Amino acid sequence: MRWRIYVNVMAFIAAAMLLMANAGAADLKIGFIDAERVNRESAPADQASKRLEKEFQPRVQELQRLESQVKAMQVQLEKDALTLSENDRRKREQDLSRQIVDLQRKQREYTEDLNLRRNQELAGLLERANKIIRQIAESEKYDLILQEAVYRSPRVDITDRVLKALADSK
């Protein structure tokens, strides 16, 4: 992680020096975008979150139902363990084990599917945000807009403008 920050800082310094050398006496206009904030606070991110919640709600309910079922089976087995024959007890234990394995498999599939869909939604948001950032950069004559920095002045932070533009661009 540190080498990545170092490379970004060095690239920024090199780019700034090149731009200053080429621009001569012209001012260098730099902006900054807090990408995490855009992913967290933007209207499209909120809409995507609601879509995912609605899309995956039936599976969440199914997983909760299966989990309750497994817990009930465990409680019943523990309660009846002393009165069951060895064969019946073993049969119930095997059935419970199958139910637990099935639940764990469904939980993994749910997590994988949710992560895949979340990444798809995030990619769409990133594409929209980058388009708006380019529009702002071109219209306001920015020389450089960064998404990662060790330090940034609030003066160069254009995240609020990007958030507003994303909200307006439904």
Image: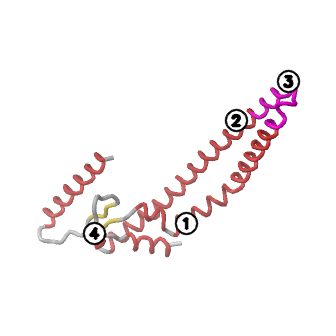
Secondary structure at numbered mark 1: helix
Look at the magenta stretch and give its main secondary structure. Answer: helix
Q: Pointer 3: what residue?
A: 87
Residue appearing at x 41%, y 61% in the figure: 35
Question: Of the residues shown, which amino acid type is indicated by label 2?
Answer: Val
Residue 101's place in the image compared with 45, above or below, is above
Task: Mark 3 or mark 2: name the one nearer the start of the chain.
Answer: 3
Judge depth for marks 1 and 3 and give the one in front: 3
Task: Give the CA separation, mark 4 to mark 3.
Answer: 72 Å
Q: Which residues are magenta?
A: 77-96
For label 2, count other residues whose C-alpha is less than 10 Å away and answer few (under 14), some (14-19) or many (20+): few
For label 3, count other residues whose C-alpha is less than 10 Å away and answer few (under 14), some (14-19) or many (20+): few
For label 4, count other residues whose C-alpha is less than 10 Å away and answer few (under 14), some (14-19) or many (20+): few
Q: Are marks 3 and 2 in contact (CB under 8 Å)?
A: no
Question: Of the residues shown, which amino acid type is indicated by label 1?
Answer: Asp
Q: Mark on residue 46?
A: 1
Residue 68: percent from left, percent from top? 75, 47
Residue 58's place in the image compared with 83, above or below, is below
Task: Mark 1 or mark 2: name the one nearer the start of the chain.
Answer: 1
Task: Give the CA separation, mark 3 to mark 2.
Answer: 21 Å
Residue 163: percent from left, percent from top? 44, 71
Q: Pointer 4: what residue?
A: 153
Q: How is the image coloured?
A: secondary structure
Task: Give the CA separation, mark 4 to mark 2.
Answer: 52 Å
Judge depth for marks 4 and 2 and give the one in front: 2
Secondary structure at numbered mark 4: loop
Task: Mark 4 or mark 2: name the one nearer the start of the chain.
Answer: 2
Residue appearing at x 70%, y 35% in the figure: 101
Task: Mark 1 or mark 3: name the one nearer the start of the chain.
Answer: 1
Secondary structure at numbered mark 3: helix
Question: Of the residues shown, which amino acid type is indicated by label 3?
Answer: Asn
